[in-house]
Image: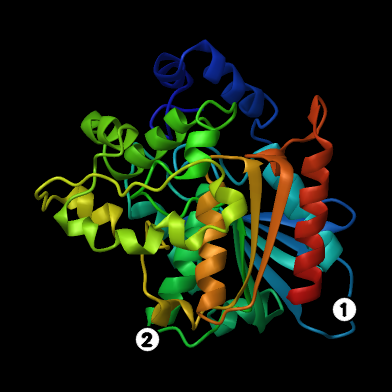
Amino acid sequence: MSEGRGIRKAEISELLGLKHYMGVMMFLTVAEEVVPASDDNVKVTDALFYDVPVVVYEPKRKTNGELNRAVIFIHGGGWCLGSARMGPYDLLSRRTAKELNAVVVSVDYRLAPAYHFPVQFDDVYNVVKYIVQDHVLNQYSVDVKRIAVSGDSAGGNLAAAVAQQLQEDPEIQVDLKAQVLLYPALQALDMNTPSYQQNEYMPILPKTLMVRFWSEYFTSDLSLFHAMMSNSHNTLESAHLLKFVNWSVFLPEIFRLKYNYTMPSRKSSDPSETISAIIDPRASPLLVDDVKLQVLPKAYILTCEYDVLRDDGVMYATRLRRAGVQVTLEHFKDGFHGAMMLTTWPTSFEVGHRMVNSYIKWLDNNL
């Protein structure tokens, strides 16, 4: 990984210690970048959409004149790691294009800490705005009524935020058909939900790493990281939004387990740009009222039992349903964060294959 494109491996090792570092490296080792190439079923090309690099996967199977479905895919990696060209993402996009006979646009947004919020969101949003132009839809033979936005982890965060912001944009008259959120990160106000507590030391994505990702997304000032780790980063400016992430209200009892809700502590005031970013719905999609949720497209939300982000996805599913949105919540009791990307030797997990199959099936039936 080139310097300036994300958190360096040495920095992760120093921060986490050997045990957690090895868990992260297990993922990175099997996720090296590849050069996506066309095959018998899918045409693969590199492109720039409003100066944002993307990889476009086009199915070669003819559709008797019918327009293609389209999936805009946003990779995970804590806004700091990863790319559309990593092997697991290439495989997923290629399979999606082939089995759904859909155009897949995989976005290579800029990464933290070289770039902070909202750069990542803006890159993805600009790609979506580019795609929904008539001449682009015609170029790729895409049906404007059958477009989904999808992403895993930090990519799920960006997908949810894009789906919301499209509804606020008077310049865009296109409605997404679906949003697909794969173990998404959706809020940065409460780092002490039951899933953060239960999975604090879980390999791949321990609490320490997820909080580091969040803090690096907003700023390079490590004081935010330490405040978030102790759940003491809220202020009077964010306090009124805690109601939207109150897990004692929005988590079904099965997910609350033995934990008791305590409202995060608050500082007296902090009118800084950092807290403004944390409470921005483009960063924390859970922090909007029901009026803004009820206009959203149908959703597929995948969550894993062994994942600090589990409760973010479950709370969002609850809130969307209460707002009247059609939601499919697929919870994998034996799942762990990142499993969808671990489906090839030497880390091929059966639960990862089930997740991918569920994802493809839902898209096929709902897009």
* Residue 169 - label: none
Q: Is residue 50 left or right of residue 355?
A: left
Residue 30: image x %, image y %?
Answer: 70, 28
Q: Amino acid at mark 1?
A: Thr
Q: Residue at x 39, y 58 (%)?
A: 245
In what quadrant of the picture does the C terminus appear? bottom right
For this view, does 63 lie left or right of residue 228?
right
Q: Nearer the viewer, residue 181 or 200?
A: 200
Q: How is the image coloured?
A: rainbow
| Element marked by disc 1 | loop
Crowd tier of the residue under label 1, counting other residues whose Cα lies within 10 Å: few below 14, some 14–19, many 20 or above: few
Residue hosting label 2: 170
Residue type, numbered disc 2 = Pro
* Towards the viewer: 68 or 187: 187
Quadrant of the rendered structure where residue 40 is? bottom right
Q: Residue at x 50, y 30 (%)?
A: 200
Compared to residue 194, the image places residue 164 above or below, namely below
Q: Which residue is mark 1?
A: 63
Q: Is residue 148 visible to us here? A: yes
255 over 222 or under it: above or below? below
User: What residue appears at the point 43 percent right and 28 percent down from the top-left corner?
Assistant: 208
Measured as percent of width and height from the top left, residue 152 is found at 60, 50
Q: Is residue 124 placed above or below 309 in the rendered structure?
A: below
Vertical position of residue 27 compared to residue 71: above or below: above
Do the residues bearing badges 1 and 2 touch, measured as CB atoms within 8 Å? Answer: no
Mark 2 lies on a secondary structure that is: loop
